[in-house]
Image (cartoon, rainbow, N blue to C red):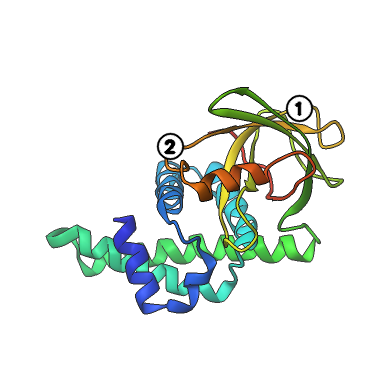
Amino acid sequence: MAKYFYARLFREHPGVRSLFPDDMADQRDRLFGALTAAVAHVDDADVLVPFLRGLGADHRRFGAVAAHYPAVGQGLVATIRFFSGDAWSAEVEAAWKAAYDVIAGVMVEAARQAEAAGEPAVWDAKVPRRERPAPTVATFTLQVEPDYPFRAGQYLSLTLHEAEVRNVWRDRLGSGQGARRGLRAALPRPARHTTARGARQRRRLRRGGRRAVAAPLPAP
């Protein structure tokens, strides 16, 4: 379903393609993760609204703006219609459109408020220390610029790839006492990153390097 959605979105709205990474595997997982979380809490506004607000503010790091949301909504409804078959009806379509309008409205407003409050879309971080406790795992320490709102046990979302590779982020479980003392996280070596390019990307996350870090994410 996610492949169909993105293929249709990029075909009908090619201008949004630059917001996404070249390798869409992780992005497709993110889409289903977000949809699953939203559906699971659809009747619990106390959980759903903060979740959507976090997504809205966080999507600023990808360059998403309010004008992009209608295209995504059209593509999402068209995808659900395609896979629903005979179960689809005008009433179902109206319900999905109304639900998406609410979701998009919350996310857009959260992004607007974050901008108005001066909240960064990303923070700058340097890597003062990197270790390799096992052949397939590296641990690293990040020193993030002041006021990074991290709490131990949250996930860090940071860039790992070359600067010219657009919007490639990885989530890592962080630990530590706060930005001043440094945040520690592990970097497993994915099987698909066994190419020379993958090795080069891993080497770039070395001591003295710099990374962009998004707002911390709560543990699932």
Q: Distance between the residues labelled 1 and 2?
A: 28 Å
Q: Name the residue under label 2.
A: 191
Amino acid type, mark 1: Gly
How crowded pointer 1 is (Cα within 10 Å; few <14, some 14-19, many 20+) is rated as: some
Viewer can see residue 118: yes
- Residue at image coords 45%, 42%: 41
Nearer to me, 20 or 51: 20
Q: Where is residue 209 in the image (x, y as percent from the top left)?
A: 76, 46
- Image quarter where the N terminus lies is bottom left
Q: Note whether 219 is above or below 65 in the view shown.
A: above
- Residue at image coords 58%, 41%: 171
Residue 207 as seen in the image, left or right of residue 166: right
Amino acid type, mark 2: Ala
Nearer to me, 7 or 109: 7
How crowded pointer 2 is (Cα within 10 Å; few <14, some 14-19, many 20+) is rated as: few
Tell me which corner region of the image, top left, top right, bottom left or bottom right, holds residue 56.
bottom right
Q: Name the residue under label 1.
A: 176
Which tag, 1 or 2, sits closer to the chain's start? 1
Q: Which of marks 1 and 2 is in front?
A: 2
- Residue at image coords 68%, 50%: 214
User: What secondary structure is marked by label 1?
Assistant: loop
